[in-house]
Every structure is written in structure tokens, then in C-alpha cells.
Amino acid sequence: MNSDIQGFYKGKTIFLTGGTGFLGKVIIEKLLRSTEVKLIYSMMRSKRGQSIQERMAKMETDVLFAELLKLNPDSLKRLVPIVGDCLEPDLGISAADRKLLAAEVQIVIHSAAAVRFDEALHMALDLNTRATRFTVQLAKQMVQLQSFVHISTAYSNCVVTNVEEKLYPEHLSCSSDKVLAIREHLSDKLIDDMSPALLGRYPNTYTYTKALAEDVILREAVGLPVCIFRPAIIVPTYKEPVLGWCDNMNGPIAIMYGTALGIVRLMCVDKDANIGLVPVDYCANLALACAWKTDQSAHSSGGGEVAMGGGKPTVYTLAPSAKNMISFGQYINLSLTFRDVMPLSKMVWYPVLYCVLNPWLFRIGTFFYHMLPGYFMDLMLRLSGRKPRMVNMYHKVHKNIELLGPFTRRSYALDTSNTNRLQEQMSAKDRLTFQFDMNVLNWGDYFKTMLFGIRLHFAKDPNTPESLAQALKLLKRLKLMHNTLKVSLACAAGAILWSLFKLILN
């Protein structure tokens, strides 16, 4: 059985930005394990005191690459670092390396991004918008370029709730070229002070600067074989290469981990609203399929992927399908379903999670569910000679929940028509090798995989019967304490009400 996608990547040279990020690493692993790609030039920089060579060596010890290195110990020799930095002009790539990339690269995957919702505007502009312009300018110099995939987000146009697979430049207060021109002439502080005026209805700097990056593609990538890939909320691996792998604590995973520890007990969400979760391995598979389809369309149309959309790049969105949607209520229920099956050994309380929709009720509730227990635990830490940390941690949790508010209290309808058509055009082997079908994803099985990954990769609980038995014993004890506390509080409330009732009667 033939694989068109594997045939497309055979002998190809790829330039990848964001290769050390969550999605970038999975793309690298998938390319090296499932295709005969010639080279992957991955742009890297020194970070937190680690040199590029040290970061490369660290990748070799990452469990994500264990299966790959078992199959072929020399696989990572096809991964070549290119010194660069998205914060620097022209990506900080040397003239010699630019010449090398321009001569050899056939495929560009631009994955680098600043994903913090509360990033300062000047920083988000440099990393998400200006770096996209520099990547496009570099791609225009590539004499063998066959495909350019710009990785955006399904929420880049969150100012509307029914998001089609098209671009929405009309929602920007200023076009990308004007904003970048302003950025060049104003200080960081002045740009940050202009945030309310520039963002308009966008809820944070992340979604705004990703929308601007799409506008850069629309305006400046004309003539290139380019497409835009918009994944929804990227969460741990489902099937490959390892179960439940994740290397960050962003968004829903942080909430799930905090709940499993018994720390996060209250959320401000609409339980009926949809949540757009997509496994990172599905995202990597679709990104690679998009590159193949973009090249195929360029050959069939004679004018590149840009010409296909009437002068606009084709957009591919990955999100839960209308037939297999999941709500926040289901997300919470599934998160708690497996607490009695795979609990964590470091729980501080029995895992529960209550939801309120009203932000004011949430703020009141956090005092009783989070802050009071936090002050008590910090007191115990002080008395035992350790540094208090729970109250500060709860302040961060509440800030993150507030930042997520625009996405947890409303539903988004994310059109995936182009993605569905792409999947239909793939061969049976490609649909199996590059799986991203959200119609058939089993959410119950996936949440079990996620909790397994959280237990293994974040809680560092070994996958052994002894570790599980110890955690189940702790869970049983915490459940008894939890129920005892509930009964005690109910009795105390009843006693207070009875005393008030007697006072009224007297």
C-alpha cells in the first residue's frame, strides 16, 4: 500500500522553527520515525544557561524519543541545529546559514510562538508577528521551496464564536504592516501602554498577535506555496510515540493536574460550553499532511496553495468534530472518573472539582475552597521549618483561571471543512500512519491516557503496582477525611440554623 505523504518527505530538507517546543518536538519525532526525511534544520538558541549542544543532548534523553532511538540509534543525526532567535532581526541567523537554508530547504514549518496569554505586547509582537515576517522573508529566498506551513491557533479569531477556515483581517484595529511599523519606532513601554487600543476586542496578547501573524501571511506570503494550520487547545499525546506525554503545564493540563493533587477544587466555567482539546500527536500528523497537500495543490493549480483560495492561503483547523464534541462538564467528569483508578501518590486532599459560572461567586468561593486551606497549609509548612508556598500558588492558579475565562465561559464553533476534505483525499495507509480523525477519538480512553501521562511525567509516580497501591491507600484515607469534614460542616451549619430558629421562636 502506497503512502503519498511518506513519498513526499523522502529525501527532503526541512527548516523548522519552534523545534524545542511542545508541538515542535513531536513533529521532529514523527518525521524521523515515520519518514525518510534527509535533514531537519531546527532553529535553536541558548536558553536558561544551556547551550545549543546541551539542549540537543537533553533531547536524546527525553522519553519522547526513546522508541525512535531504539529503532535507529542514529536518527537524531538527521536533526541539525541552526543558531537563531525569534527576538532578533532576521531571526538572528548568520549570513552563512541563511545561504545554506536558501539553497537546500524544500519545506518550512513555522511553529515558534510565545503562548503565554499575559505576555507583554512588545514581546508577543516580536515573537509571534515579527518573527513570522522574518520567516516569510527567508522562505522567499529558498530556491527549492515546495511548501510552507504556518502554525497558528484555532482561537486567533476568537472575537467571533463561529470561526470559519478563512482569514479575518477586518477584526484587526490596524493591519500587521502598520502595527509592525509602529513597533519599530516606539519603545517597549509605549507599545505595552497601547495594548488596550491595539487589542480591541481580543482578550489577550497571544490571540491578537497570532491574528496579526495570519495577516502577515495574507499580505507578505503572496506567491509562496503556503497554508495556515490552526490547532485548538493542544494536550498530551494519545497514541504515539508514548502514551500521555507532555512537557508543559499550560491550560487544561494544569487544571487536571491540580485537581488530581486535590489542590484545585473550584473552577469558573460554563459546564455546557464546548472545550476544544486536540492531542499533540494528531496536531503533528495534520501539520505534516498540510505540507504535503500544499505542495500537491501547487502542482495541480500551477499557482501554488495561495492561488487555490482566490489569492488567500488555505486554512486547516483541527478541533473536536460536531459529531464528537466534548463539553467542560464532560471534561471535569472524565478528569474525576479515573481518580479511583490511577490516583497520585502526592495528593494533599481528595480530588474534587466544583464549578460556578458567575465570576463574583467564584471569587467568594475561592476564599473558602482555596485560600483558607492555603493559609492553613502554609502555617503547617512554617511550623515544620519549610518555606510556605500554597497561598502564592493559589494566586497564580486564580490568575490563570481568570485568563482562561473568555474560553471557559462560552462555546466556539470551529469549522473543519478543509481538514475533513484533506483527510478524505489521503490514502488508507496515510490515514493510518498520520492519524488525526477527531470523529473517532474515544474521549474516555483518551482521558485515561492523559491521567496516566500526568501521573508518570508530572507527578513522577513510577508505573508499578507498588506505587499504585500506595496511592490508592492514600486516596482511601483522604476520602474518609473529606467525607468526615463534609459531615462535620453540615452538622455545624445545622446547629447554627437550629440556634437561629430557636432565637426566632423565643
Image (cartoon, helix red, strand yellow):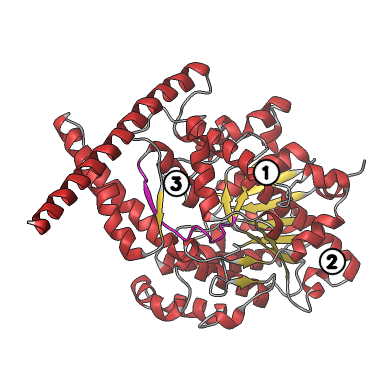
Taking depth in this image into account, of 404 and 93 the one nearest to the observer is 404
Q: Which residue is mark 2?
A: 298
- Amino acid type assigned to the residue bearing label 2 in the image: Ala
Q: Quarter of the image containing the N terminus?
A: top right
Taking depth in this image into account, of 96 and 474 the one nearest to the observer is 474
Residue 275 on the magenta span: yes
Q: Position of residue 187 (x, y in %)?
A: 37, 74
Q: Nearer the viewer, mark 3 or mark 1?
A: 1
Q: Is residue 145 something one can see in this rendering?
A: no
Marks 3 and 1, how far apart at CA: 22 Å
> Which numbered disc flags the more N-terminal residue, 3 or 1?
3
- Amino acid type assigned to the residue bearing label 3 in the image: Ala
Q: Nearer the viewer, mark 3 or mark 2?
A: 3
**Is the stretch drawn in magenta largely helix, strand or loop?**
loop
Marks 2 and 1: in contact by CB < 8 Å? no
- The quadrant in which residue 318 appears is bottom right
Q: Residue furthest top?
A: 466
Q: Which residue is mark 1?
A: 442
Marks 2 and 3: in contact by CB < 8 Å? no
- Amino acid type assigned to the residue bearing label 1 in the image: Asn
- The quadrant in which residue 347 appears is top left
Marks 1 and 2, how far apart at CA: 35 Å
The crowd level at tag 3 (other Cα within 10 Å; few <14, some 14-19, many 20+) is some
Identified at 61% across, 56% down, the residue is: 111
Name the element at disc 1. loop
Q: Residue furthest front?
A: 505
Q: Position of residue 464 (x, y in %)?
A: 52, 19
> Which numbered disc flags the more N-terminal residue, 3 or 2?
3
Taking depth in this image into account, of 446 and 70 the one nearest to the observer is 446
Q: Which label was assigned to residue 254?
A: 3
